[in-house]
Every structure is written in C-alpha cells, then in structure tokens.
Amino acid sequence: MLVTGAGAVGASGIIKAIRRADAFDAHIVGVDTDPDAYGFTLVDTAETVPAADTDAFVSDLLAVARREDADVILPLNAAEVGPLSEAKPVFESEGIEVMVLSPQALSVARDKGRLYDELVKQAHPVAPEFYRVSTYDEFLDAVHALGYPNRRVCFKPPVSTDMRCFRVLDPDMDRFNALLNQKPNSTVTTLGDVLPVLQETVQFPELVVMEFLPGEEYTVDALVRDDETPILVSRSHNEACDDASFVGTVEENPELLQDTRELCSVFGLEYNVTFRFKYTAAGRPKLVDIHPRLSPSVTASVGAGANIPALSVQYAMGQELPELDIEWGTHVTRDWQDVFYGPDKDPTTI
C-alpha cells in the first residue's frame, strides 16, 4: 500500500497501527514532498513526490504506485485529498483503490459554508447558528446579529484544513494576560483588533461567522462503508489540544454516534471521515467541521480496540471486517516523536 504525507502530523501512529493488522501484512510505501519526512523511518520504501498543487503530482504518484505494485492509496495530507479525489478514476483503471471521498461529497465536506447550508436545508439540529459573509458590512452585521458584544462570536474561512485563521471575538479578553501569559498564536481577539485589518484589505475574504460554542469538544472517527453501517468511535478532548499532542478519552456518546450515522448518509460519505462537535451552553451538540481523512489523533481509537486505519485498508481491499469490542473509557495521551539525521547515516528514532 502507498501512504501519502509520510511527514504529516499523526503519520507515525497511523503507520504503526497498520503494522498491527492481523488480516494482512502490508508492504508500506511512504511518499512525501520532504526527503527528510520523519515517517520515512517507519515505511518499507520511501519516495519523494511533487507538491499536491503541481501538475506533476498525480502522474508522479501514479508512477510510484505502478512501480511498487500498490493495491491501495491512503492519503494523510489534507492538501492531497482533493487532487486524489479528482484523479480516482485514473488510479482505479490501473486496479488501485484510492481511499478518498467522491468529488461531490468532498466539495461539501471541505466547505463549512456549504456544509452548514446543507444542514439547515435538512433541518438537522447539529447545524450551528452562522452567517456567510463576503463584505466588511456583512461581517459587522453578522457579528452583531450573533450577539456581540454580549456573546462571544467566531469566524473562519469556509475552506481550511486546520485551525489556521480561526478566531474567537471576545469583548472581555484580558489583553494584559494575553500579552504576558499566552502564546502569540492565541485564537482569542476582539472586534476592535480585527476591524482595522479587515478595513485595509483590498479584497474582502469570504468568511463564515458563527456562534461560539463553550461546551465540551468531541471527535467521532468514522470508517464509512458503502451500504453498510459505518464504524464509529466517539472521544472527548480532556485538554485543549494542538496538532502534535493531546489528551482525551474514548467515550461512548450515543447522541453523537447517531448524529454521525445520519450525516454519513445525508452527505454520501465513504472511507475515512473525522467529525468534530462542540456543545452549546445549553448542552446541545453542534457540528463544527468534517475532515475527509483520518484524524492525526485516530490512534486514540486504535488503543480502545478499533484499529480504524487497518480496518480501512481491509475495507478498501474488499475484505470482510470483524466485529469490534471497543473499550469505552480508554484514556489516551500523545506527545512528540524525535527523528535524528546523522551525517552519512539513515535516520533513526529513540
């Protein structure tokens, strides 16, 4: 099998999870744009490829897949999901299964404005309160319509792969505390701080302005199978997490599991999808976003008995999947992994 984004956050745990599979013995080819990608220490064959936004990406990746006789391709880099979705028929004509959503499903999952619009059309209760804006005046109207300054408000671009550009407008923000005690990349700011920046922009960006959700955050890892019940694992975030480390608990949440089943059907999803929910102050869950790939923290599910990366490969190969016995209540912590590049030596880890 071929794994793209060998240097992506979470690649280490996902590759190790695939190695633990009982149903198959994988020869893993890892590819990345970076010749020093840390995941190259964990794969059987390593190859560099062009970036996903270049014309040569698909053709070069197909050449690697042919040369290595790959059966399946598992993308871990968010930027590669779109090009691989569009090129899926090309790979399928060579007998190679690409584990991505269809272009139609992907276009909705990746665009939070379209995603929320569809939830509203479906009258689904997980739709957050939101506005799509594309001008300065629309932005101001939306922020105030959502209750600012009496309520905190969020905004973000409709298409984004992580927390980049996500901001929380908090009128009670302690600027002195933020200056001396918080990281410079804090997402919390005030309307007064962002308005001068937005006023100066030549082309106002399209944004989604939405309600602030102060409650608990949950993730649902999903392996969505065509015409079969999806495999779902819900987990809470016990501490604020970043891309590299987190603390959480695999926690059975029937409400979110049912919501996720419905959303998988509504949007015609398949393969690996990660759902992120947050609760309102009144205790109602709202969908924050859908990531159309394995979560970097999917190893939490692996530790609880649901090896979703390996099961996904089995599904892609047409194998029957086993019944799962998930150990709800499993607590997980994840931290960094070090890779060392010595002079004239292969990279090593501790």
Image (cartoon, rainbow, N blue to C red):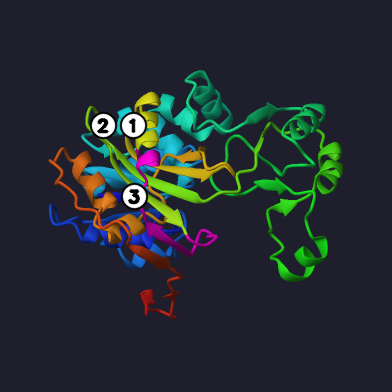
Location of mark 2 (residue)? 92
Estimate the x, y position of residue 93 in percent, counting from the top left.
24, 29
Residue 294 lies, with reference to residue 240, above or below; the image says above
Residue at 34 percent of width and 50 percent of height? 252
Residue 145 figure quarter: top right
Location of mark 1 (residue)? 88
Residue type, label 3:
Glu
Q: Nearer the viewer, residue 233 or 83?
A: 233
Residue 316 figure quarter: top left
Residue at 31 percent of width and 47 percent of height? 64
Residue 101 lies, with reference to residue 195, above or below; the image says above
Residue at 29 percent of width and 34 percent of height? 91
Estimate the x, y position of residue 232 in percent, counting from the top left.
31, 43
Estimate the x, y position of residue 314 in percent, counting from the top left.
19, 45
Residue type, label 2:
Glu
Q: Nearer the viewer, residue 209 or 314?
A: 209
Residue type, label 1:
Lys
**CA distance for labels 3 and 2:** 36 Å
Contact (CB < 8 A) between labels 3 and 2?
Answer: no
Whichever of callouts 3 and 2 sits on the residue coming sooner in the sequence is 2
Q: Is residue 197 visible?
A: yes
Q: Residue 252 carries which label?
A: 3
Estimate the x, y position of residue 231 in percent, counting from the top left.
27, 42
Helix or strand or loop: what does disc 1 sit on? Answer: helix
Residue 243 among magenta residues: yes
Residue at 31 percent of width and 65 percent of height? 42
**CA distance for labels 3 and 1:** 34 Å
Contact (CB < 8 A) between labels 2 and 1?
Answer: yes
**CA distance for labels 2 and 1:** 6 Å
Helix or strand or loop: what does disc 3 sit on? Answer: loop
Please provide the residue range marked out in magenta.
238-257
Classed neighbour count for the residue bearing mark 2: other residues with Cα under 10 Å, few (<14), some (14–19), many (≥20): few
